[in-house]
Image (cartoon, rainbow, N blue to C red):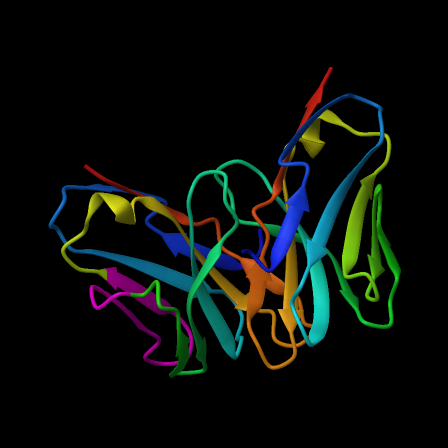
């Protein structure tokens, strides 16, 4: 079982709408959690990094939240744009260990 | 532009051939990672370097795979006797240690026919 589970697997929304992507993890001991955006055929690009003491972080229309007690994170996208169509990957690092990647949520924004 | 280039961007090869990919970070980073990504999945860790030293290798990295970072800057990943199951996107990344940013290259798409 993957130590980082993302849901939904895929999501279709209309342009201008908001959406929330979920990430649950079992990685321990926790170091940090990252959200990446990956356009088709490109490498992932970092959106946010959160450590244990941070429970929210924003990057423009992207807002990530972290509940280290329940080991859950979410990525909220506000006022979606067509260019938001991409895969969004949650990555969790354990102390002294390498990163564990989720399978990603494939978001499609339609006009 | 993340400051990490990979070459080639696409490679089509016949089963049994050897292939080599290169990763060039623009600026100095102690850590350099290689990942493999198949369609619909997140990247899977293959190996990483701390400067010239290869510190960890995944069990995914069979004997047919070898990676080097001879001068602590660019890195190469070689796959010998390619198999169809090697078809994937191979991603290079730098940074990412502790809470530092990690920067990915655009990847090399390998297709083994």
Which of the two residues, B31 or B8, is positioned nearer the viewer here?
B31
Which of the two residues, B6 or A12, is positioned nearer the viewer here?
A12
Q: Residue at x 46, y 67 (%)?
A: B33
Q: Is residue B106 left or right of residue B64?
A: right
Residue A22 percent coordinates (x, y): 74, 45
Residue B78 percent coordinates (x, y): 24, 62
Q: Is residue A22 left or right of residue A93?
A: right
Residue B25 percent coordinates (x, y): 48, 65
Determine the image quadrant of residue B20: bottom left
| Residue sticking out furthest to the left | B16
| Residue sticking out furthest to the front | A1
Which of the two residues, B49 or A74, is positioned nearer the viewer here?
A74
| Residue sticking out furthest to the top | A111
Q: Is residue B91 left or right of residue B16?
A: right
Q: Residue at x 44, y 39 (%)?
A: B39
Question: Above or below — where is A84 with respect to A97?
Answer: above
Q: Is residue B73 magenta?
A: yes
Q: Residue at x 86, y 30 (%)?
A: A79
Question: Above or below — where is A99 with respect to A14?
Answer: below
Q: Residue at x 20, y 64 (%)?
A: B64
Q: Is residue B76 magenta?
A: yes
Q: Which residues are magenta?
A: B62-78
Determine the image quadrant of residue B98: bottom right
Which of the two residues, A29 or A16, is positioned nearer the viewer here?
A29
Residue A24 percent coordinates (x, y): 71, 54
**Looking at the rendering, in which quadrant would you find the C terminus of chain B?**
top left
């Amino acid at each position: 079982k993957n130590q980082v589970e993302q849901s939904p697997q895929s999501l279709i929304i209309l342009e201008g709408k908001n959406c929330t992507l979920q990430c649950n993890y079992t990685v321990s001991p926790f170091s940090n959690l990252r959200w990446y955006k990956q356009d088709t055929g490109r490498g992932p690009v970092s959106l946010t990094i959160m450590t244990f003491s941070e429970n929210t972080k924003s990057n423009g229309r992207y807002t990530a939240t972290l509940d280290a007690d329940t080991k859950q994170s979410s990525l909220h996208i506000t006022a979606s744009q067509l260019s938001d169509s991409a895969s969004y990957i949650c990555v969790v690092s354990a102390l002294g260990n390498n990163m564990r990647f989720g399978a990603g949520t494939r978001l499609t924004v339609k006009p | 532009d993340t400051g990490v280039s990979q070459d080639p961007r696409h490679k089509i090869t016949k089963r049994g051939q050897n292939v080599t990919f290169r990763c060039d970070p623009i600026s100095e980073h102690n850590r350099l990672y290689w990942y493999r990504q198949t369609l619909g999945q997140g990247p899977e860790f293959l190996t990483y370097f701390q400067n010239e030293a290869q510190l960890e290798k995944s069990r995914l990295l069979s004997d047919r795979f070898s990676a080097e970072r001879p001068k602590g800057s660019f890195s190469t990943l070689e796959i010998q006797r390619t198999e169809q199951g090697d078809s994937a996107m191979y991603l290079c990344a730098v940074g990412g240690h502790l809470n530092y940013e990690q920067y990915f290259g655009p990847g090399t798409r390998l297709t083994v026919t």
